[in-house]
Image (spheres, grey):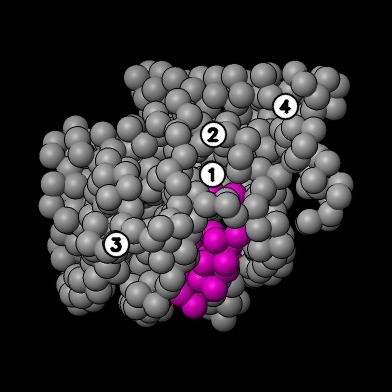
Amino acid sequence: MLVIFGAAIIGVLVEAFAPRYLRKSIHVPLTLLSTAGAFVLVIFQVIGGVPTTAAAMGAVAVDGPALFFWGVILVLSFVSVLLVIDDEHFVASAAAVPGSAAEEEAEISGGAHTEVYPLILFAVGGMLLFASSNDLLVMFVGLEVMSLPLYLLCGLARRRRLLSQEASMKYFLLGAFSSAFFLYGMAFVYGFAGSVDLSKINDALGTVGGLDTVLLIGLGLLGVGLLFKIGAAPFQAWKPDVYQGAPTPVTALMASGTLVAAFGAVLRVFWVALGNLDWDWRPVMWGVAILTMIVGAVLAITQTDIKRMLAYSSIAHAGFLLIGVIATSPDAEGNATSLSAIMFYLLVYGITTVGAFAVVTMVRDAGGEATHLSRWAGLGRRSPMLAGVFAFFLLAFAGIPLTSGFFGKYAVFVAAVANGATPLVVVGVVSSAIAAFFYVRVIVLMFFSEPAADGPTIAVPTAATAAVITLAAAVTVVLGVFPQPVLDLADKAASALFIR
């Protein structure tokens, strides 16, 4: 985290003092090297042994799951930054009014919005802190450090400027509202336990009496703040609009890295701090998981925009992951099985998601990215390889065997059945079948429809974009055929959780 935040501060200094023509040449290696260097440090920490005590005066839990989440977030942020390198995605001057002469002048002069790099680093640092917080107050700081840069980044799309700014404003307003819920819930929990430390809150559950109402109100408010970040129903309304309006590389980062960080925080709060209260929160979480899966799968069928469809797909996958959160067990081994499944699922889903959005950036027309589904008709005939890779990603989302998505869902469903959540698995299987319909619909559209005469063009990928698509496809294939090494790594990380 110190490496990432240090690089972000250096990036701010570069923006303040370096000549404009030099900024990108400094930012790109700084951002890539800092994320890669932080990932190497995570590996060294794992080799050196997982700490048994929290760091930073007890504020940060550097345990097995935290190190796994850190590694996943850093990998996803690295590949997302490779997409950001293409200047085509970001506006030349964010201060210029959309469609104005000032904006046109900035584009003609080759202006570049290079502050996206330090903003991304701050967001990544917030993700790392959010997923590993051992203290509700630090978790709130991580939440804000993660969210504030993303609010800005969502409004910097080069094309469809008004849609991008609308997405930014919606995300900011709803995100601030959910953060207020989280903060207010933290105050109630503090009123109950006398501490914001997660382990001390857990200890207070068995000793403090007469304040159950205060605790339950705090639990509900905390849940609203956290469920908003993962896009669980009924708090999912922001996702489709924001995913559609944001620059696609930012959408890729949000759909992958933010989801990993948010689930890390959810597990910290509901398993570590409030694990002994599971009889109270599990019934509510059952309803949320079922609603999330159904809403995500059903509403995705009605979408005509590829990015909105992927957004509703993300909502459905958040419901599948919540099945793992619900599948708690009285013994540590059962919890470790569920946790391992969640971590593996987040890794494979995140990599596939970045790859899918990388493909979206390459299908373009005169207005920028051609995201309307009708424009994808006959894409398999225009570019068989690109359409084939995208179809493979969609099959992975659907959980088809021989893809990483199959083993991700299988691991979560098996853990849920073992821990008594079989009805949720039934709903999950039905939702997966519904979701498979709209994935297959896109595949049929690409390969069995006649391409329009004025159809979109396929942009020649930059080396960075080609590397992202290749890496995502390779990981999806390899983990779909031979997932055991990563499953073993997740099992090892899960066994080191600070369980109640």
User: Decide: marks 2, 1 in contact (CB < 8 A)?
Assistant: yes
Q: Kindly identify which numbered label has been placed on residue 450.
A: 3
Q: Amino acid at mark 3?
A: Glu
Q: Residues within 10 Å of mark 3 (few under 14, many from 20)?
A: few
Kind of residue sitting beneath label 1: Pro
Foreground label between 1 and 3: 3
Residue toward you, 227 or 481: 481
Mark 2 in CB contact with mark 4 (< 8 angstroms) = no
Q: Secondary structure at mark 4?
A: helix
| Magenta span of residues | 225-248
Q: What residue sits 16% from the left and 56% below the top?
A: 400
Residue beneath label 4, please? 11
Mark 2 vs 4, N-terminal side: 4
Q: Is residue 408 above or below residue 82?
A: below
User: How many numbered badges does the structure rendering display?
Assistant: 4
* Residue pictured at 16% horizontal, 65% vertical: 417
Q: Is residue 160 part of the magenta span, yes or no?
A: no
Q: Is residue 53 left or right of residue 409?
A: right
Tell me the quarter of the picture where residue 90 sits: top right
Residue bearing mark 2: 81
Q: Disc 3 or 2, which lies upstream in sequence?
A: 2
**Which residue is identified by label 1?**
249
**Amino acid type at mark 4:** Gly
